[in-house]
Image: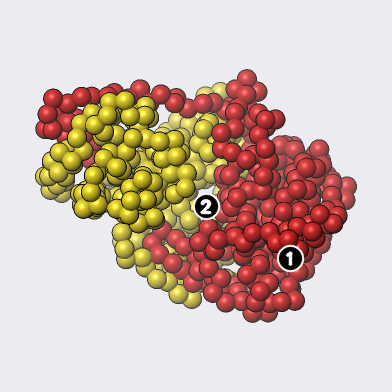
Amino acid sequence: MREEVFTLAEVREGRIHPVSFELLAWGRTLADKLATNLSAIVLGDDLEDQLEELIFYGADTVEFFKHPELDVFNIENYSEVLVPFIREIMPDILLAGATTTGRTFMPYLAGKLKTGLTADCTSLDIEEDTGLLLQTRPAIGGNVLATIKTPKYRPQMATVRPKGRKPLPRDDDREGKITIHSVDNNFSPRVRRIGFTKRENEISLVDAEIVISGGKGLKEPKNFSLLFDIAKDLNGAVGASRSAVDMGWVSYPHQVGLSGKTVNPKLYIACGISGAVQHLAGMLNSENIIAINKDPDAPIFQVANLGIVGDVLEILPLLKKMLQEKLKRNV
Amino acid sequence: MRIGVLVKQVPATDKVKMDESTGTMKREEVEAVINPLDLYAIEGTLQVKERLENSEIIAISMGPPQAKEVIKEAISMGCDRGFLLSDRAFAGADTWATSYTLATFIKKLGDFSIIFTGERATDGETGQVGPSLAGQLNLPVLTYVSKIVDIKEDHIIVEREIEEGIEILESSFPVVVSVIKAIAEPRLPTLRGKIKARNSEVPILGLKDLGLEEKDVGLRGSPTRVVKVFYPKLSREGKKIKAKNTEMAVDFIIDFLEERGIL
């Protein structure tokens, strides 16, 4: 058994997806602790000019499987190529993003390989005495965390929540080995993609890594435009409390809470939302919570990492301006 | 056409208490219900039955003997019959061992064209059983299915919702299909269904009935082990600031965003 850490890079519409670089940050930590190699697996077609990026972001080796039929995710084609490869290499650890692809392909693969897989990990570590992968994930509606390991089967597999960690800084002095496997399979998958419609509208609330939500404190429907502007600048989405939706200020798809959507973004900004239990149920698991509210006793402050007691209608316009300046400078 | 639908009994609320000393769920006080997301899977099967009338829908569950109730609920909504896989030896199964047990039953009964599942169960929340089952049975799998576009005797066409948009996928049979809420609001049980459910016998199959060995099922057959379960820090150690003026308030927010690596 080669003690290696593998990550499954993800390709979407011909580009290596950012989650691939986040996975390398996780993988780097684990590989360093185990004093072993970190490898990125890539399946696709015309990606040669992007492969070096995986080295720059932390991979020691890249294993690229090239074939026109691997251009878009197809579970059977992926599996046909990777099952023999994984069986031969038997990596110690295999990580993928907890995306629609990772969450479909990894359990399929683990099912075939008979090994353990932990979904949606928020943290990964190596157990000191044993060198085993410790996989921590939220369980039971996010009320508790569970740490899970796979003692006897290999690879130890995990999907990792996107945006759970930043990629390492890009280092174009890093060197590594890129292997191109020319795949000559005659694929005949039973599932075929026969169409695709790209979503052109704003980022969906559930997938957004930044959510800015408004409640009664916004006073008027037109003030929601402030939230939409800020969300656009931050590449986020707009949420709302039930009262804001009930009053018709925004449409139901924006509602966060028990009777709306559950979100767990990296950042949740609650603007003029008091924090009724019904609302908290939909956003409590957000990684960072900022609450802005006039009422210092609003329950929302109990769950906020940063609570600002103040008038949201004064704060938001200035916040919007400051953010725009900040982002302009960062470009 | 034979269609299976996987259903699971779960605790009624997500406010389940944990026993931190043993790392197990305190299930006693909590009412058990059918996994809410499985209702959408049942809805999917019923949509198929509407279009292909000679279909037979079989609900399948694995769990303790009282999980019979979820099979009965599935029947009350329109499923034709159901089976419960139940045995002390199945206890403590992770997603691999659960899928293996289910796969064994599915092979044994045979002749399934489609196996429907929900997106995930609200207790375990892994969403892994559908794809794992497909992997073990060497079947194709369609996940995140938001719409059944077309279904004929030999193939199905669905919409699959992914991060960037909507894929249209076509698959031959047999296939595993896991559906999301967008498939349609699940229909309510009918009076006729309820009567049928009340009069239905739900066969219970155990280890021996399935020809399984203890080493391959339940905790013993599970590749993963839960090492510990703990409460995350609920107090966010947050700070509440009453800003003297708007500028200060905004500065606090910007600083926070930079500190957390968001900006």
The amino acid type, in three-letter code, at marker 2 is Arg
Residue displayed at 17% across by 31% down? B249
Please give the letter of the chain rendered in red. Answer: B
Residue tagged by mark 1? B57
Which label number is shown at residue A142?
Answer: none
The amino acid type, in three-letter code, at marker 1 is Ile
Residue sitting farthest toward the right: B208
Q: How is the image coloured?
A: by chain
Residue A215 visible (yes or no): yes
At which x and y percent is residue B115?
68, 62
Residue tagged by mark 2? A103
At which x and y percent is residue A210?
31, 45
- Where residue A22 sits, quadrant-wise, is top left
At which x and y percent is residue A6?
48, 46
Q: Seen in the image, is B32 located left or right of residue B127?
A: right
Badge 2 density bin: few <14, some 14–19, many ≥20, Cα 10 Å: many
Residue displayed at 42% across by 53% down? A9
Q: Seen in the image, is A312 located left or right of residue A125?
A: left
Residue displayed at 62% across by 40% down? B12
Q: What's the chain of the residue with tag 1?
A: B
From what the image shows, is residue B130 above or below residue A257?
below
At which x and y percent is residue A41?
46, 53
Secondary-structure class at tag 2: helix
Picture quarter with the N terminus of chain B: bottom right
Residue displayed at 80% across by 42% down? B65
Q: What's the chain of the residue with tag 2?
A: A
Nearer to me, A169 or B247: B247
- Where residue A13 sits, quadrant-wise, is bottom left
Please give the letter of the chain rendered in yellow. Answer: A
Secondary-structure class at tag 1: strand
Residue A175 visible (yes or no): no
Residue sitting farthest toward the top: B21
